[in-house]
Structures are given as C-alpha cells and as structure tokens.
Image (cartoon, rainbow, N blue to C red):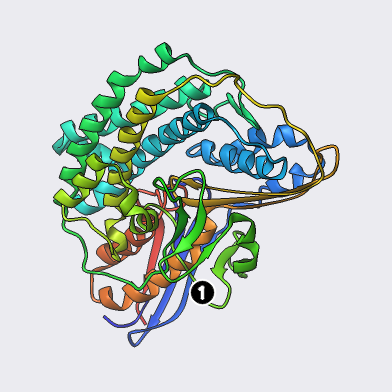
Amino acid sequence: MKSRTVKIDYLARVEGEGSLYIKVKKGEIIDLRFSIFEAPRFFEAFLRGRSYQEVPDITARICGICPVAYVMSSIYAFESLFEIKVEKGIRDLRKLLYFGDWIQSHALHAFMLHAPDFLGYDDALKMAKDHPEIVRKALRVKRIGNDIMSFIGGREIHPVSACIGGFYKVPTKAKLESIKGMLEEGLKLAEDLTRWASEFEYPDFEQDYEFVSLRHPDEYGIIEGRIVSNKGLNIAVNEYDEYFEEYQVPYSNALQSRIKGRGSYMVGPLARFNLNFDKLLPRSKSLAEEIGFKPPIKNPFKSILARCIEIAYGFEESLRIVNEYVEPSKPRVEVKVRAGTGYGCTEAPRGSLYHRYEVDERGIVLSAKIVPPTSQNQLRMEDDLRALVPKILDLPKKEFTWRCEQAIRNYDPCISCATHFLKVEIERL
C-alpha cells in the first residue's frame, strides 16, 4: 500500500491540542503537517508591565507537569541580569527541587504513557492488568518525585518556595535528612524499572540528529552551563538568539525552532544523555552500561531508556545533595535591581527551556521571550515522521497510525502524551 492520506484530527489527553496530517502518493510524502492548534496563551504578552518579582510564579503556570523548569529558567534569567550569586546550599536545594520535577515527570511519561506502546496496550490501565507490580513501582516513583517537590517547594504543583536570590524558606540539615529513606527506595525502584524497560523490542530506526542541551564542566547539565551540541555548537546562554530562531508555519499556532542555517535539532533526555553521559554518577552510569545503553544513541524510540537513566541519576544525585548539604547562611540574597536584559536556560524534563527578559530601572518587564522544549522539538518530530512513514506504509491502518503516534510520543509528555489519537481517517488514493 504505497498511497494514503492520514488525518489525525485531535490528540487526546495532552497538555494542549494537536493533530497530524500525512499525505502519501506512490510511496512519496507530498504533505506532512504536525499542527498544534491550541489557542495562543499570550504569557509573553501579559508579563509585560509586571514586576520582575512576579515572573517566576506566573511562568510556573505555563505547565502543570514541569513548573519547576519555568520557575528556575526565569530565576536564572533575572539573576544573570542582577549579577546574583547564591551559596552552594541554595544551589543544591534548587537541584533537589528540580530532580523532584524530573523524577515525577519522567515516571509519568515513561511508564504510564510510553511503555504501553512497546507492549501493545492501548493505555496504562490495560497494561496494569498484566503488569501490576510494574505499575505499582512506577506510581511509587512518581509519588516520591512529587513528595520531593512538596518538601522543598511547598507543594507539588506550582511550587512556591523558590525566588530570585534563593528561597523564601530553607530546611535544616536534620529535616532534609528525613527524606533519605524515600530517596534510597526510589533509586532501587528506578533501577528495577530501567532493567524492565531495557527488555522492550525497539523499532529499527536511527537518524542523524543534532542533539542540543546544557553541559556543565563538573556535573550532568541541568541548571547551569553552556548550550552545546554533538555537531560543534558551544555557546553561552546569552548567545542563544544569535544561533537559534523561531518561525511561524501556517498550520500551527506554536512557533517552530531551528538552528540558523542548519535546520531541526533535538532537545530532551536523549540529547542530554548523549552529551552528558560522562557526567553521570557511578551508580547510574553503571546501570546504563549494564543494559548496553551508551552513546551515541540515535534511535528516538529508545528515549524511554534515557528517561529511566535520568530518574536513577536524579535519585543518586539527590542522595548526594542530602548527605553533603550545608545550611545556607540565609535563605536568599538581596536583589539590586537595574535595567537591562537577562538570559536563563535550564533543562526541563522534556529539554532545554530558554527565557529572556528586558526590564527597566524599576524591574518592570518591558519584553519577554520563552522558548519551551515542545516548540524546539516540533520540526524534529516532523523530520522523524518523514523518515519513518515510507518504511511503514504497508502496515494495516491501526498499526500504521499507532506507529506515527509513537514517533511523536518519543519526544515529550505535553504534546505527545496521548494514549491514542481520535478521529483517524485514512484515504487510499
């Protein structure tokens, strides 16, 4: 079957609304559109005129799955402008809060939304009938991630403790050590789940990706570092706009992103793993080597394993932070406001998240730019589909549609978390 039109009008259970349209004639793709048609939310516009102090809490509302990423990227943007340096204790607490977000988001996506694809289930509920212990372990891992966010951030959805300059309140050493037990439990569960996922049968599909992520000289990139790629990119965060550009396509309300003069690129767990493997801690690195998961990994369907390794790393690094934690001398440093432009980039669970803010001498926002991982990966998703579709044209309708969905679900849980698509039509030409 070499000619068909696939219309996927609506993606169910996603944070946002999207669709997919593919038209193939005589084995050749003549049209392919991955469309995000959710109405614009205007966050960048209504941040204008707001005080810099309001920005972290407002931007957190962009996403209920990875709010910490928005909080931290905005905080780092303003701290770069106001030339704020925080103590090690503050920085460690920020990482711990961030790991809670990574762990709960990765667990949700990997085991509840992505794993059913590899086992032939329509959803996690049906998978749970045959794999109840796996689902229980996954839910426990997610619960621990949420508990870390509550412990450090004050609540698990849209945490409220972090601020520009530090935190409103920090835990004592004794209180922080009270979570060691659940971190150790989580690490063991993460290792078990990783070994389980490593046994999946993965499609034979590789692409020549340009992977992009933060890289730090001393640790796995997450909250600080330079933006690098496997094809020579190595820039400071404040150079982002010189190398990356957003542009509008007529069929989507979301902007797409590309590297100027080079095209699509991938951000997210697989990119981070390929670019930061040498910075993993011993236990998580040993786990990756045990399952034969070492760079370069160019199969996007194996992104689930990168998420699994990052869950294990998150627990391992969280334990290190708790063991070495030294209470900061004060929860936050004084902010000295000045006019200018601040730049911030951190690694959300789904990939690099870039913020840029221009403020006046009172700290009032004059302009804002936020580039989320989904928009950065959108063009790359289309490129994957263009390479995949010719290989699967002869599959039956249901399997063909499912494989296209899975190719999108490889990327992130905000657009590609649908268990299945609705209103699928295939026209045979």
Q: Quadrant of residue 204?
A: bottom left
| Frontmost residue, 7 versus 366 | 366
Q: Position of residue 165 (x, y in %)?
A: 64, 31
Q: Residue at x 61, y 61 (%)?
A: 240
On screen, residue 135 above or below 252: above
Q: Quadrant of residue 129?
A: top left
Question: Most extreme residue toward the bottom, as rendered?
Answer: 26
Q: Is residue 16 visible?
A: yes
Q: Residue at x 25, y 47 (%)?
A: 115
Q: Residue at x 44, y 69 (%)?
A: 382
Q: Secondary structure at mark 1?
A: loop
| Frontmost residue, 278 versus 411 | 278
Left or right of 258? Residue 140 is left
For the N terminus, which image quadrant?
bottom left
Question: Most extreme residue toward the top, as rendered?
Answer: 174
Q: Mark 1: give few (<14), some (14-19) or many (20+) Cα within 10 Å.
A: few
| Frontmost residue, 280 versus 428 | 280
Q: Position of residue 368 (x, y in %)?
A: 72, 50
For the C terminus, which image quadrant?
bottom left
Q: Is residue 5 visible?
A: no
The three-letter amino acid code for the residue at tag 1 is: Gly
Q: Residue at x 24, y 47 (%)?
A: 285
Left or right of 65? Residue 245 is right
| Frontmost residue, 396 versus 73 | 73
Left or right of 204? Residue 238 is right
Q: Position of residue 233 (x, y in %)?
A: 49, 67
Q: Position of residue 146 (x, y in %)?
A: 41, 27
Q: Determine which residue is flagged by label 1.
A: 263
